[in-house]
Structures are given as C-alpha cells and as structure tokens.
Image: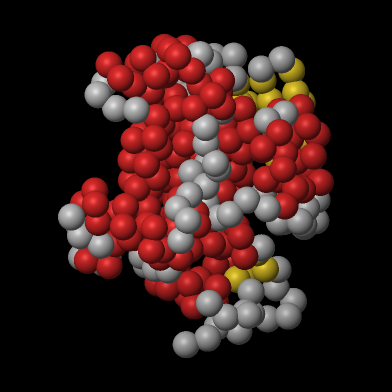
Amino acid sequence: MQVRVPAHERTVHPGLARAALLGVRRLGSGPAAGTAARLLATPEPVPERLHHVLLAELTGHGWPALRGAPEHLLDRPRRGEIADLIERGSLPELAARLPELQLGYHAGHTTDLSLEPGRLTVTHRALLGGAPKPAESLFTAAIHDVLVAACTGRRPAVTVRFADGSALSGDAPGERSLAGRGRVDGWTLDLATTQEAARSPVTAVRDLIAADPARRWRLEAAAGHAGCSPRTLQRTLAEQGTGFRELLSATRLGLARGLVQRTDLGLAEIAAACGFTDHAHLTRCFTARHGRPPSAIRGNGE
C-alpha cells in the first residue's frame, strides 16, 4: 500500500524520517512505522504529520529512546559537511554551522545557539509556520547531543528547559516518559560537568567507537579522545584481558547485532555502517564470535 502525500503538506527529510523510524523499531513496530517504512522504500516523501507520530512514540519512552534515534544519522559511511565537521572535532565550528546545516533537513524551524567554554545553549524557534511541537524540540535536542558527542568524543550533560519553568537535568534526562511536558524553551549541552573523568579509559573508548563505528579508528586517536596516553590505554586493556583491536571488533559486532535484530537493513548496509569491509567480512567476524551467521538470528527475537 502506498500513501500519497498531498502537495500542500510539508514533508520530512528522508534522513530524519529514517532515524526516527529506526529508533521506533528498537521499541517494536506499530502502524506508523510500517507506513513510514513503505514510503522510505519508494520515491514518496514522508509527511510531517506521520513523522510527528513517530517522535511522539519515542518521547513516550524517554530520553534514551530519543537519543538512540538520531544516532542513526551517523551510521552510514561518512560524507558531507556534517561528517567533515565531526572529523575535524571543532565544537565552535560545529556550533557556528548548525543553524545553516539544519535548514537542509527542516525548513520550518531553526535554532539560536550560544557557545561558552564547554557549554552550548540552544533555543528552538519557528522559522515558518507554528512553534515547534515538544517532541520535535526534544528530538532536535537529542540530535545536538549526538553530534556534539561525536564531534568532541565526550558525552555532554543535557538540561532541557520547559516553558512552564521546569527542567530536566543530568548526564541524560531520565524520565521514562517525556510526553505531556509542554513546550520546550531550549536546552543546554554542558561538557564541563560530564562524568567522563570518572569513567575508565576502556568505557570511554568503547562509547567513542559506538558513536562512530565506521571511522578508521587507531589506538593513538582513540586514546587522545579518551584523555589518556596510548600506553595507558594499552595497559588498562591488558589488565582486562583484551586489546584495542579486540575492543574495536567487539563494539562493532555488538552494534551490528543490534541492527540485524531490530532493522530490515541489508547486510551490506549494516557492514558499512559498523565499519566492516563488506557483508562477507561482517559475516565471517559475526560467525566467529557468535557461532552463527547474522541471517540465523534475524527476526527470531534473540
């Protein structure tokens, strides 16, 4: 069944629609997800009203679900301006370019950003039409969270401010449901108060790889992002009975297994997203670790 979108209705950039769809599918697919998937498989655009349904589902499952969805914006082979900015690792440059780049994804809303040392403060406002819906603002905040973490190699602490004067604060706003909270005024991403220093180098590197699995990671670069020397990272890994290549492979395979189980992406696309040479390389590594090829676990709930 194809769903025709009226010519007068605003539509959503396919990258945003795909990210929301894959985020919802982590939680179990409903009718809206099925409709969005059919549209994305054709030249038909995804209407904004359908995208709002998917965002409302994500909002109902809280911040982890919201943040997990835009991670899919980065799970394809790197290309384009955003990828270049992330690769250079310059937060001031990313902040300066975000409003312009956002217009390529959504023409209806924009953000005003203020960058202080270690802190990015954002206001979400209308550019065309009405004010952003709460779920749209929360999804945009989650996108910023993901982009800043990928750019800096550190997970920011997020504070979301609501129009009624309330706020959700912490390393990640943790309410089970964010539905019904009302209009969002803005949010702050704070790198100065992250818990990064208290985390082990191994955990920091694992999170770093998971945020950008397709990157050609090297020990030296990963150690630098984690705030330690290559020798310290090697020693810490050895104390845990592993090494950098083993950690890299295990992290990528964990992400690949999740995509195999929760999405209908082809193995070639999953391989590219997770940093494997091709689908045959992914299958060999996957089988060596799990004793079965990816096709054996797809769709069986394991």
Residues 140 and 145: in front is 145
Residue at 38% x, 23% y is 202
Residues 259 and 23: in front is 259
Q: Is residue 98 above or below residue 224?
A: below
Q: Is residue 300 above or below residue 236?
A: below
Q: Is residue 15 left or right of residue 242?
A: right
Residue at 27% x, 67% y is 295
Q: Is residue 164 visible?
A: no
Q: Is residue 125 above or below residue 263?
A: above
Judged from this view, the residue extending furthest toward the bottom is 1
Q: Is residue 268 visible?
A: yes
Residue 169 place in picture, x, y as percent: 50, 23
Total numbered badges shown on the rendered structure: 0
Q: Is residue 86 left or right of residue 261?
A: right
Residue at 55% x, 55% y is 76
Coloring basis for residues: secondary structure
Residue 291 place in picture, x, y as percent: 18, 55
* Residue 137 sits in quarter: top right
Residues 43 and 281: in front is 281
Residue 270 place in picture, x, y as percent: 44, 59
Residues 202 and 146: in front is 202
